[in-house]
Amino acid sequence: MDDDLERDSDEELYRNPVLYEPADRVLDLTRPDLGLPNGEELFAYLLAMRGRTPVERRGLICPDCRKLRQRRVPMYLVQRDGVWFASHYRKPGEKPISHESDEHLARKERVAKDSEDHGFSAETEASAADGNARLDVRIQGADGIVLGYEPQLSIQTARGMSRREGFRRRGGIRSVWDFTDPDHPGVGAVPYVRTPNLPASVIRVQKNPIAVRDGNFVLEEGHCSPAGSLVRCPEKSFDPQNPADGGYCGQWHRILTPIHQSSAYDGGGGEGELTLTRFIVEAAAGERVPFQHKGQHGWLPAEHWRKYLEANGPAPSSDGRERALFVRQGDRLDRCTEDRPASEVRAEPRERRGSRTIVLESRPAEVVEPAKPAVDSLGRPIPLCRFGCGMPASMPGPEGLPEHYSCRKQQEGTGAAA
């Protein structure tokens, strides 16, 4: 009787609220008595109907769908690791129940359209090949690249997002997680970009650019000094009371840093500013590559990715061990939707953001000894050539100034040609 269910994957299985329709009571599946008088008997009765009574006639429905969608959506009970959950009833081929916000839907539609316009096929609400992950937008890129675009407008835990990313990575998906909150716990925990929080009406107009403000890194190296190539010392904490203080340490560093914190950043706002459309297209084409370094994630231009591999060796590969199935233990609040506020069970303390810079290598800067000036047979310094070749002069010229005969002839030839 349960063979016609479109079962939720372990990634999609939440503790959805479930209502027992005959009594019009919400059941607490974390308790043996379901939070009701004589609840143990009711629980045994509900379990006995599994495989015998059609799902639509078991009396379990989604209270959120009834309240928000004015629809009666049947639910059924499923057990994972000794824990009972309620899942929406779907027939094979039906998409999961969702109440995504209009902004969430607009972002998916916009990315899918932009990808199609640039020659990459895209599909919304698609499943990974292994069936363990559902992608908001699945983009078929170049050379076998499969890109998953995941806008995240609500707060989720970093741990939960890392596990969701694990499902995608093991399925061969390169995920782009799009955050609008700079302090979202997922920033850095998964391969991400950060874009402005815009209304759906603005997002849906394709000519409106959506700027990428974070998540795109570059590789830089150099001497940590005011005259060096680094903007500030990556190993000294940022002082919000004195933001202009670079705090240089005098060492040499190789770093991965967000482009807006790098020496290459020109302030943005010009024609070369990175937009979400350009980022998605370049990631699908393999021109931007996700990286992970000691648990920190981001994206690198392909050229910088190659330099990163040259300096740090090949990317760590999976050890081949199968991970245990994971079921989210957090409760949803009052809506069966991805864009809901997180409950206290799921939420983690939020930390204020600082620099995203990742230090790959630091070492003392090489001491360059000043060159000793050339001297003549009497020990007197020989002046440099007046024509700017940078070498000690060999003779005094007609004007009595130090020079080389060849430099003078070259200078005279240039003047005659002019």
Image: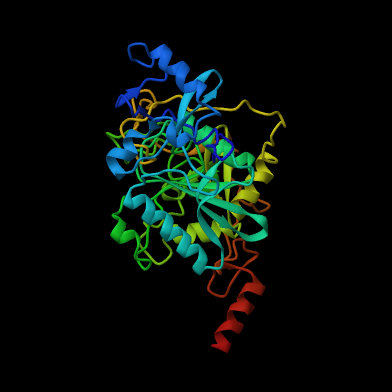
Residue at 39% across, 50% down: 213
Q: Quadrant of residue 409?
A: bottom right
Q: Position of residue 210 (x, y in %)?
A: 37, 58
The front one of 333 and 245 is 333
Q: Position of residue 271 (x, y in %)?
A: 40, 67
Q: Position of residue 126 (x, y in %)?
A: 53, 50
The front one of 392 and 390 is 390
Q: Quadrant of residue 63?
A: top left
Q: Kindly tell me whether residue 365 is visible in this rendering.
A: no
Residue at 34% across, 40% down: 65
Question: Residue extending furthest bottom?
Answer: 417
Answer above or below: position of 41 versus 292: above
Q: Position of residue 106 (x, y in %)?
A: 37, 56
Q: Is residue 397 left or right of residue 248?
A: right
Q: Is residue 312 left or right of residue 70?
A: right
Q: Kindly tell me whether residue 11 is visible in this rendering.
A: yes
Question: Residue extending furthest right?
Answer: 320
Q: Quadrant of the N terminus?
A: top right
Answer above or below: position of 119 versus 53: below
Q: How is the image coloured?
A: rainbow
